[in-house]
Amino acid sequence: MLEKNRDKFLSQNISFCKVVTQEIYADIWDFINNDVIRGIIPYFHEENVIQGLLNRKNWKSAIPDFSPVYLGMVFDVETNTYFDPCFSPTLMNIDKEGFLTMTEKYFRQFKDKHIAVQLSGGLDSSIIIGLLRHFNIPFSMVGMTSKRFEFRTEHYIQKLLAEGSEKAILIDYEKHLPFFNLYDVPAHQYPDLSSSNYGSDLAMAKKCKELGVEILFSGFGGDVLFATGIPQNANECNWKPQVFVDTWVAGIAYKPYNVDLVPFYAAPEIMNAIYNLRRGMPEDIQKRWARTFFKDVLPNELVNYTYCADFWGLYIDGLLKALPEIEKMHKLAHEITGLDYFSDEKFKEIMKLDLLNCKKELYQPIEARISLVTWINSLYLAGLLN
Amino acid sequence: MYKIEPLTGSLIYFEYDETIIKSNYPKKLLKALELCNNPYLLLPYNISVQHQIRKNALLIAKLISVTSKVNFWASNHLDSVIKPKYTDSKQGIEVFRQIYSKKKQDEMCLPRSIFAASMSKEFRKSGVIFIGVFLPSKSMHAWIIENVMQPDVNDNIWINFKPVAAIC
């Protein structure tokens, strides 16, 4: 029965390695059942989240029999493990003209597609918008917007960029806060932190579909290209694929709506060009280099000011409002797994924490836990568990 | 509404008092508040400059840093006994950032602002120290608006904090 319905399951763009035999499986839908879920090790997932995305090769799988192999990972014969290879830049001479020529060529591959850009009001996506306008390439814009105090500059930029564009849609973030509608998250094979933001990505994917958008550019990865220090020696470049592409979101939220989520800054030619342009430059948290380099295609506000809102407020509010739903999901996860990790007592312990204290150390284990219960609930609702 | 408890500096929630009339606020406060609400009206960002640190500046910075930890009221009133040495708060902030390591600076926004305000000749004319809260968290932050500028070029977080108190 599962075989027949396999097509209904979405791909989160990962494959799996069977731990004992080292065999690679394109998916593990056939193996997911109550016994497997009872055997998961939730603390491994929590530890992985705390270690961070950049240390993915050291992660321990929450499913003991299978290790996820994320898109872009490579097998290391010496250590018998998979790792994320760093981007390997090629040294070249490039100036602004060269960059623009190369970028125009990059955009040409999408010329027959209806393209759009995620309009966040931040620098990275505004650069993409500015470049498309520079080349007179038609495009739409879709973004989440917030009237919260901390987002006042982003909101201003969003309105400025959307002005005069018929195809600009801004969606109210308050209706799609992080952790909202976690029951709607489709079945996925392995827990992922991105599931907490599924609601907002789904809202954008639906709008894209309404507009007929086929390609949606995101500014994901811009932080790495523009804000980190760039080593003089190309061999020391430590850009890993996972900080440029969110494969879970692309596969689970956008693909079902026939929208390809394309992170502009993950294109090798763009990465290579920025590496060479910024080669040897120190860390630049405020992205002043990028503001100056792209000043001809950006609104003056983004060139002359370095404001950047923090998403913690949205996260905290979303979490607090979603707690009753999360508690129910915990109960179900406990019923299915029988694991103490999901017990009422453990959940109550979390509720005793000061959730208004915006410290990373406090939130990481909670986010990991929620992504675990979201995962188990999604499998249950898809009929894979009982 | 929120207010700052004068002695301890704690943030306290209270029922809004209709008798508080905004027009009674100092003009420089109203102007600075407008700039906080509309940050693109501020002057664009600048670059940070290195300074030679004099002994008395070092002493004052240490005094304010220690006092602000134990008594908000006292640290807030130190400026009345300190003679301004710098043209503006930007210089004061740059000096303070040179005195204490980058790691320590995150938790030193209030002493940094008080030091810069105390040492600035311009502050008395147009400067305001704001204390803000990043709602709904309990996270608080202090920063200065002076002469149509947010003078701390290395402060990347002030934009997130809604002003709840001001020191003029």
Image: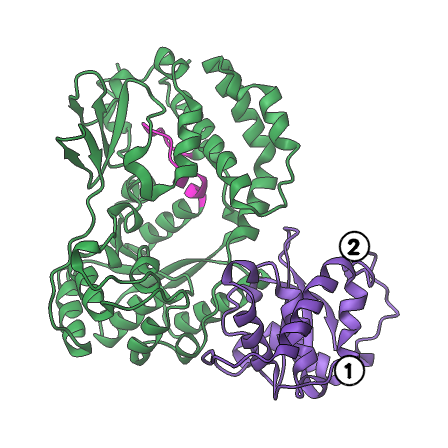
Chain colours: A green, B purple
Q: Is residue A339 above or below residue A127?
A: above
Q: Nearer the viewer, residue B78 or A142?
A: B78
Q: Nearer the viewer, residue A189 or A83?
A: A83
Residue A202 appears left or right of B105 = left
Q: Is residue A39 above or below residue A127?
A: above
Mark positioned earlier in the residue sequence (2 or 1): 2
Q: Residue at x 66, y 63 (%)?
A: B132
Numbered label attached to residue B13: 2
Q: Is residue A3 visible?
A: yes
Q: CA distance from mark 2 to mark 1?
A: 23 Å
Q: Position of residue B99 (x, y in %)?
A: 56, 70
Q: Amino acid at mark 1?
A: Pro
Residue A181 appears left or right of A105 = right
Q: Residue at x 28, y 28 (%)?
A: A8
Query: Per the image, is A50 magenta?
Result: no
Element class at badge 1: loop
Q: Nearer the viewer, residue A42 or A180?
A: A42
